[in-house]
Image (cartoon, rainbow, N blue to C red):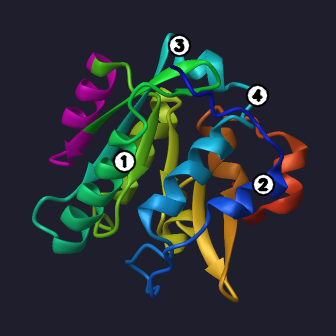
Amino acid sequence: MKVSLRRPGLLALGGLLTFFLPASAEQMSLGAEAQIPLLLKVLTYDRNFEQKAGAELALGIVHDPSDRDSAKATEEVGSTLYKFAGKTVKKLGLKYYTIEFTGAADLERFVKEKRISVLYITPGSTKALPAVLKVSEDLKLTTLTGVPDYVRRGVAVGIGVEQDKPQILINLGAARAEGSDFDASLLRIAVVVGQK
């Protein structure tokens, strides 16, 4: 049976949020089990979502295999996405890939080969961030993260926590550069952290 992640209303999103983690500049402020459903819901508020995704939603988890936090986050995010097998996001099937970042050219090649439209950037990816964001803008890929500082640095969408409550963070300039057009109803409840 297919379960669609349709928009039940933004207020219902709060019910998805548990599993808080202590935050630092390089850590996820919210655990993957709470963060991923919320990020997938946010994607459905992009007016260009279906056009960018194509026949299915392919998501790449970009990580640095030499960084312990990055490896741990990749496992956590991958395990959470695995639970979405057989479910859909706006009627599109979901598949994911883990991507060891070795350089922009390799990332671009892999993204094109697998028809990836969304990149999730793990903690521990600070050095790779400029190159990843260049690829995302060039190929119009939506970038997501659980590291609030990465949104300030140019990732389009992230999740933060303020006073024990989750926050949707949107870098509007980055989102537009990546070809996203988020609905005003989302932007009203999100924290817009930057514009290009």
**Of callouts 3 and 2, the N-terminal one:** 2
Q: Is residue 169 visible?
A: no
Q: Secondary structure at mark 2?
A: helix
Q: Which residue matches tag 3?
A: 54
User: Is residue 25 shown above or below 81?
Assistant: below
User: Is residue 51 shown above or below 166?
Assistant: above
* Mark in the foreground, 3 or 1: 3
**Of callouts 3 and 4, the N-terminal one:** 4
**Residue 8 in the image: x percent, y percent?**
79, 41
Q: Which residues are magenta?
A: 98-113
**Of callouts 2 and 4, the N-terminal one:** 2
In the image, what residue occupies the spot 51% across and 79% down? 20
Hey, which quadrant is residue 69 in on the image? bottom left
User: Is residue 164 shown above or below 169?
Assistant: below
**Of callouts 3 and 1, the N-terminal one:** 3
C-beta proximity under 8 Å, tags 2 and 4: no
Hey, which quadrant is residue 91 in on the image? top right
Q: Which residue matches tag 1?
A: 132
